[in-house]
Amino acid sequence: MIAGAGLAGLTAALAARSVGARVLVLEAAPPSLRGGSTRLSDGIFSAGFDPDPVAIERGPLDADLPKTLASAAAATLGWLGSHEISLRELRFDPVVGAPASGGLPLRQSLGGGPGLSSRLFELAQRHGIRVRYESRLADIEHEGSRLTAAVVQSPQGRRSLPCRTIVLATGGFGASSELRARYLGACWSSAKTAGSRFNLGDGLRLALVRGAVATGDFGSCVAWPWEATAPPFGEPERPDVFRRLAGGLGLLVNQLGLRCTDAVAGSSIAEQAQLARAIIAQPGGIAFQIFDGSVQPPILPASYAVTSARSGATVEELAIHLALPPAALHATVAAFNQVVERPSVGADTPGRSFGDGWAPRPLRMAPFAGHPVTTAVVATFGGIRTSTVSHVLSIWDRPIPGLFAAGEVVGGLFAGSYPDGAALTAAAVFGRRAGLAAAKAALQLPPTFDPADPEAERWLLATRSNDRAEG
């Protein structure tokens, strides 16, 4: 049984099926919204990591997980390729509009996140993997220490489904206002969700009740500056439509007309998360990206075409249209321009300096535009502790029988941010491991069982014949 149908869940399903296991995937979403956060991503992977920088900012981290990710990434992408998942090489990250962090080559799936998700479901169907929609894992049943069934919640009610192992691939808690407020801070309760609306922390809650250990950086997340008037959740077919990642081209002010964060270029996931954290901490969780007339397409990303922006021939007129104090905004822009044109001044307001390595430009050319922005959570880092083969660990550091996990529900891999392409790569690496380990445990195969071995192939043929005979 696999709970979750994003990349982690469906790679687990494919890996489990490869050793002959019968697999049922529980997808909380209806078919129209299926695919988890994978579908809302850009479909970007990285085949190379230095295991130390995998943890961008801070811990607590599990040192073994980043090492496993670094060592298994290339082979896992090769495995995806063997399933005809096409990945084209990139040296420029289209998400943040900058070279890949660390100079590492990135790879993007055909059709981005939506295309990747669609391909995974095609593969699941081809390999006889069943998917049950609008179905959430509500509980786990045991006989002694042995896992015996999953309790599944659907619109028709609760039902107990027999199984021997379960893989938790339910995502993080980014769509739960309650858990965001608890772990990230009260102001985050109003944040929007760039990931799946079904990332409600289900797997985390269930695993903790069953004796798992919470681990990782619960106090931070990856987040984007986001269109303030957007719906609460992202658009599955256009995951970038509400992103507002060009803040470094202008000035960020709050509802008081005051500059509210250091000016940074925003050329990395970590810098965008820094801007997003500053925005959500402002009054009302709202800020405004102010640009002058020189910032137009193609400089301004295409995602800005869907916007609630206002414009004005002067800064004061723009302020009126945005319901900001005109005098305050005029003074803020004037101070900003003075520092840009006289770098020796160093900062335009006390403590508000320019980010390292970025040369801002003055806001002089009419018309002036203001884009209302808020914050959307992309991914959370706190989760449950697992082994490197994705077995969920107890407070005694022992595997919980029959329970495995992969994807965003796992904690201890990243903190503060992550390198370009790391999130999907980790989902594939540990999803594959979880699926193999869960299938071997269910079928009572030795951990060293290799599906490529000739003896294994004969065993698989016999098992699949039994599958057909049983229905």
Image (tube, grey):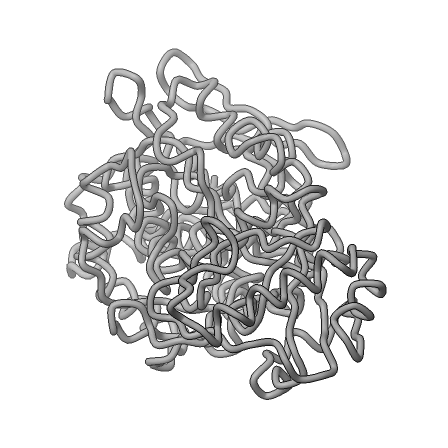
Decide if residue 73 is on the left or right side of residue 463. Answer: left
- Between 345 and 114, which is closer to the camera in this rendering? 345
**Direction from residue 318 to residue 297 in the image, left or right:** left
Q: Quadrant of residue 91?
A: bottom left
Residue drawn at x 15%, y 59% is: 453
**Residue 148 falls left or right of residue 175:** left
Residue 241: image quadrant is bottom right
Residue 301, position as x, y percentages in the image: 59, 78
The percent position of residue 220, horizontal first and vertical second, equals 44, 40
- Name the outermost residue toward the top: 144
Residue at image x 64%, y 57%?
253
- Front one among 367 and 132: 367
> Can residue 464 be seen from the camera position used here?
no
Q: Nearer the viewer, residue 363 or 223?
A: 363
Residue 470 visible, this orientation? yes
Mark count = 0
Residues 88 and 83: in front is 88
Q: Is residue 178 above or below residue 297?
A: above
Where in the figure is residue 251, as x and y percent of width and height?
Answer: 58, 65
* Quarter occupied by residue 297: bottom right
Expressed as whole percent of the image width and height from the top left, the position of residue 82 reads 32, 72
| Rendered residue at 21%/57% (across/down) | 72
Q: Is residue 42 left or right of residue 453?
A: right
Considering only vertical position in the picture, is 347 above or below 98?
A: above
Residue at screen point 42% across, 51% down: 8
